[in-house]
Amino acid sequence: MVLSTTAIVAQSNSSVSQEKVTSTNDLKKSNVQSISNNFNTLTIASYQQQSQNKIKEFFEYLNEYAQTTDEALSKELEKVLLQSLQNENLGFTNILNPAATKVSFATLLETVKKNNLRFSLFSFNTIKTQQSYFECEYSLQISQMDEVKQTKLTQKVYLYPYEKKFGQMQKQVWELKLGDF
Amino acid sequence: MNELDVFTLLKEEVKRTFQQKYPYFEGALQQLSSQDILNLIDDIQEKTKQTVSEKWVYTHLKPATNAKLPRKDMLDILAMYAGVENWDAFKFQYQGRDAVSVAKVSKAYQKYFFFGLGIVMLIVMSVVLWNTKNNTKIQFQNSFSKDTIAKKEIKAYEIKANNETEIAVEALEKPLAKPIKVVLKSPFYQSKTVVVTPTTAVQTIALEPNDYAMMLKAFMKSDIKDWQTRKVQLQKILSDDLEVMVMLKNDLGAEFFNKEEFAQKVIVPSTWLKQMTIVELKTATDHKIVFVRMTQD
């Protein structure tokens, strides 16, 4: 049975606050680091495409996580899922009850595992490019036993400069990390 | 050949086109999983700017045989996806002109036709043989397994006055006026300097594999099982200073991963990772991999 629901997309209550600036210096720094100031249109399009790949990969890992009964593998999947996120304190739309309060990453995993959920994604669209993130919209099909639901989600994907360590070395790279949905 | 037969051929072409982006999909269209179907729908949309529904794929593409032909507008979309203008153009490739007019060609005309065709083929073969007379055939071989190495994995650089200039590997097979000194490089094999001489004999060049690079290549295409072995091996083959650079589409933009991040991705390889190709790889003195550059297929 297919039910159609439309997610109530709540405003992000992510602990990452990319948009607030409190001084002229912060504003200048923010502009210098902004996506549009650093990349041309074609490159931005490449990063937008990669954002979609990352979101698909996230749900692919969630599918594996839901299915596996191997405790150790579950831990590995948790690590790779967490690694793809901008930070571990993001809030996620409760995919089984979109109208409810957002849930933590841990609760999202618990929900996925407990209900043996299966996800399919389609109809991707980057609807907005802000200073430090893209806003991606997509349709998520959620299968639970014989029931199939569909919901529309909007997710931020952050692109920002970051001093990353490569062993002994450190260099500035542009990081692409998933935000909340 | 009727239209349903032609539709079966079109489905094969659709599968081949799909496998260009998802080479790990094996088997027939009947074996498409729900994720594969979504990937197929996305790929069709990307290439043709038109949509087919999941239900349509289940109804017309997944079944091994079809009782009736789908709607023409859907056939046009599939033909476009397979690289042909539309369904009529695809049909024409197999059914040819009006079968009735073919049947009307008399036996006398057929005799002259085949005679002429024979002459043309003789001429073409002579020209090809003449042109290849002085060509060298080069074959690259794994020095341990003796397996043939795909030329696309090798880059060749002509050495002249201590300078290296990249040349196409195929250029080594064209007629050479004199021997040339070439260094062969690959992410998966040790570099080797050879002298390619003008000869008609097959030249087999054995290259020593870079074991760690071969392991990484295999790991990236693995299924999720055996992840524990992979996890242990990755610690061994990847340097702590590892830098992995993933070139995005059209080489515009890049993502960077350090050892911890990259190892985590290879422990549980995703569809995205399996589509990546290693184009450059560097090792440290302890043979551990210290740099990888990858692009998307």
Image (cartoon, coloured by chain):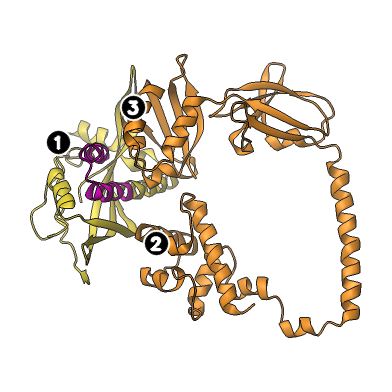
Query: Does residue A144 sit above or below A47 in this rendering?
Result: below
Decide whether residue A66 is among the magenta residues: yes
Tell me the distance, in whole angstroms, between the alpha carbons under discs 2 and 1. 48 Å
The reply to the same-chain question for discs 3 and 2 is: yes
Magenta part, dominant SS: helix
**What is the chain letter for disc 3?**
B
Query: Does residue B212 sit above or below B17 in this rendering?
Result: above
| Residue B232 numbered tag | 3
Instruction: From the image, tell me which residue sits under label 2.
Output: B37
Instruction: From the image, tell me which residue sits under label 1.
Output: A22
Query: Mark 1 packing: few (<14 Cα in 10 Å), some, or many (20+)?
Result: few
* Left or right, residue A10 beside residue B109: left
Give the chain ID for the yellow colour: A
Residues shaded magenta:
A56-85
Secondary element type, mark 1: loop
- Tell me the residue at 35%/24% (across/down): B235
Query: Mark 3 packing: few (<14 Cα in 10 Å), some, or many (20+)?
Result: few
* Left or right, residue B79 beside residue B131: left
Secondary element type, mark 2: helix
Query: Does residue A25 sit above or below A131 in this rendering?
Result: above
Q: Nearer the viewer, mark 2 or mark 1?
A: 2
- Tell me the residue at 63%/36% (across/down): B148
Decide whether residue B158 is among the magenta residues: no
Choose top left, top right, bottom left or bottom right for residue B156: top right
Q: Position of residue B191 (x, y in %)?
A: 60, 22
